[in-house]
Amino acid sequence: MRTQTVVEDLWERLTPRFLSRLGLRSRFMVTAAFAIALFGLVNLVVFDAVAAHVVSHEVRDRALTLSRRLAVEAGRLVLLEDRAGLHRLLIETRRTDTLCDYALVISPSGEVFASTFENGVPIGLAEIANTASAGPTTRVVADRSERYLDVAAPILDGELGVLRLGARMDRIRSGAAQVRMVGIIMVAAFLVLGMVGAYLTAHLVAAPVERLAARVREFDPTVGAAEGSSGTDSSSDGGEVGELIQSYEAMAARLRQMHQEEEAFRSRIVRAERLATAGALAAGVAHDVNNPLAGIRNCLRAMERAPEDIEQTQMYTPMMMEATHSIERAVRGLMDFASRSAPMPESVNMARLAERTALLVRHQFRGCRLELELESSELRIETDPALAQQVLVNLLLNACDASPPGGRVTLALKRAELGITLDVIDRGTGIPADLVEHIWEPFVTTKQDRGGTGLGLAMVKSIVADLDGEIWVDTEQGQGTRFRVSLPDRGTSVEDLKSSEPQPIARPEAK
Amino acid sequence: MISRASTRHGVFVAALLCLVGCGDDAVELDFSQRSTPPPAVSHDDSRLVVGVGAMIGPVETYESHAGLLRYLARAVHRRPQLVQRRTYEEMNRMLISGEVDVAFICTGAYIPIRDRVTLLAVPIFDGEPSYHSILIARDPSLRSLSSLRGHSFAFTDPLSQTGRLYPIYRLRRDLQTMPREFFSRTVYSGAHDESVHLVLDGQVDAAAVDEVVYRHLLGDHPEYAPRLHVLDRSPAFGAPPVVARAGLPDDVVQSLRAALLASSEAPEARRYLQDLGVDGFAETADYAFAIRVARDAQIGSGDAPEGTRAADVRAVP
């Protein structure tokens, strides 16, 4: 474990910073290219040195062999004192053997018998090695920039003198250069092959990881497992990556399950909260039912007292009809509110909905004044009316609860670029700063003593999200609170919504 | 202070440099500055110029004669100088012109100039100052001189007693024919050992060579023996003599002759005699048969040589 940490630490230090910014595939390729290039370079240097060594030895060996052979032939000609033959031998050798750049035969006394030089032998050249030795000896002779490997081969053990042979050393260099070129081509080929190999290896390693990354990126807990896997077969990946994919699949399944459970829980909460609100509203609705009922009862009593009074009956009947309509409206309003299903968008005039909601909650506004500020009487958008109304009801009841006795609560609706915005403003004490961040969480309430469930704002946020809208809060201690809801016209595309930046809302003016 | 790492690095670089072969001490010269070669030293009295006829190759000649030459030069207090030529004719010319003081020449070369040179001594082979000519061949079906009709043949030198004159003498005497008519082709090898090699290599079918050289060669190369056979052997000739040019001072001639005759007894010369394959030296030998053979052969052959040089044969694959 400790060693592993040290290795990881070392790797961290050695890896260039930019490498960590690259993708897995690129990182692999860069590392492979670097390794191959480094390996190639080392190879090239060693190869070059060895090639130069081998070529120089090869040239040396060839020069030695040639000089030995020439010395034997020269020996015969020296013994026959055939200077012309000797000269011919040397000239022919230089002409036919590329290794021979000059040659001369020197007697034991230092006399030059014959040479390939036309106008005399270079001064000092004959004197370098005219003494006999057991076998051929070599040395380097430099003439300005030109260097020669000079071989001295004794003729008949040196008794007849020495044969000297000069081979230009740039032949060694050019030979080594040829070998070096082969080396460079080989390294280049290795680099290309290596890169192809690295690419394939990187593909083998990175592809499953990239597939996994894509799966993680596209993971949607709302989409089922069979759909979510989008046809990729995790069983095709073995080893660590396969294990990783399996772990991820298990985790994704757990996440999906948790999401489903949360969804179910949330819908139960929403329903519970709605029913709670409906209960609270029911008390107010009772007024709207009782008053017409009282009117109907009075009418019926009068009709009971004078059943023959047709005129009276004809006058009361429409009044009773109107009263039953009032009751029906009140009850339907409550029922509409209480019935909750999945969002079913339809064309809704939000101005009318605001008015109806104001009627629904007016009995709950004990000591508060509700002011409606409608930009227009026709603010139509595509949305779910029941859910939108629930948002309004909750925000209005909250606002009223937060307001001081006799306080004003303002419900303002106006058209926005892609839908409408509605503001619910109270002039209450505001939300404590330490609570603002937590108001959207379930079971956070300041109204425990007044029967608050702590689910209202959590549900509001959830519904607004369902309606593709957004909600902000702006509050100041002692000044009041403004909730701003932006509801899109669902007839416009979601992409348009996303691009429209929410505008910061103005601080509610304290009055 | 040099760190350990950099020292190691230095060692590595030095090793690489050594591999490349740097660090040679080059001799700096200027090839544009030329020296004219000194004139060849002319003959002077401080040297004993000894010529050797091309009975064998020049290197083999040098190796076999160098010791004895030094021995002779010491005897007359001179520095030895060995001279060789490709043909007996050239060596004879040098003897006559006085370019060489002493020469080891073939019997065949000696006969024509025997009145113009001084006989110093004659080598003794197998106890006698004489030697033989032999005919050799590779093909076992060639059993006699007459069986060589229509075959190719190698002579050594136009003046060679054993290598040319004797076989021509035999052709004339026994078969009344001439080499040009008898052989399909003839060549001059230039030396007896070369003739043996021509037969061994299949360049020619048969050759006439000096028996002493032949035995010497087989002694050095026993592997040749099974591939060759001798199909004819001549009577004895006077052995190839050592002669001095006319005009060589008498005391020098006497000293040289004395040294040669005493060589078999002189411990320092015995090894040199072994190199030559010679037992010692006699004062003279019987050249009567050789003179007859040379005369008869020369009459028959005319002036024009019958063959081509061996070098020409070898050049053609």
Image (spheres, coloured by chain):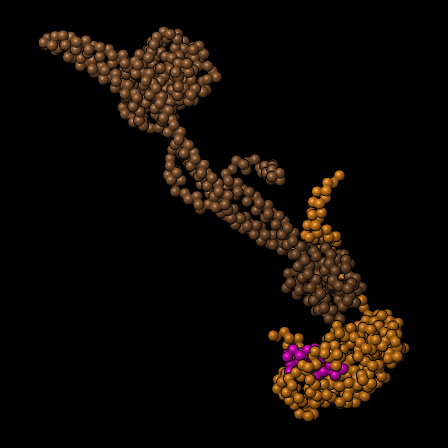
Chain colours: A brown, B orange
Q: Quadrant of the N terminus of chain A?
A: top right
**Horizontal and vertical percent for residue A449?**
41, 14
Q: Quadrant of the C terminus of chain A?
A: top left
Q: Residue furthest front?
A: A305
**Front in this rendered view, residue A144 or A47:** A47
The residue sitting at 39% across, 8% down in the picture is A404
Is A14 within the magenta?
A: no
Figure check: B164 above or below A457: below
Residue A346: image x %, image y %?
Answer: 27, 25
Give the x, y percent position of residue B231: 69, 87
Left or right side of A381 for A180: right
Residue range highlighted in magenta: B188-214
Residue at (73%, 75%) from the top-left corner?
Answer: B57
- Residue B247, given in percent of the width and then of the height, sits at 85, 78
Q: Nearer the viewer, residue A477 or B84?
A: A477
Q: Residue at x 64, y 63 (%)?
A: A97
- Quarter of the view holding residue A482: top left
Q: Is residue A79 left or right of residue A305?
A: right
Above or below residue B299? Residue B10 is: above
Residue A117 visible in the shown view: no
Asked if residue A178 is positioned above or below residue A273 in the image, the reply reads: below
Q: Could you say which quadrant of the image residue B312 lies in? A: bottom right
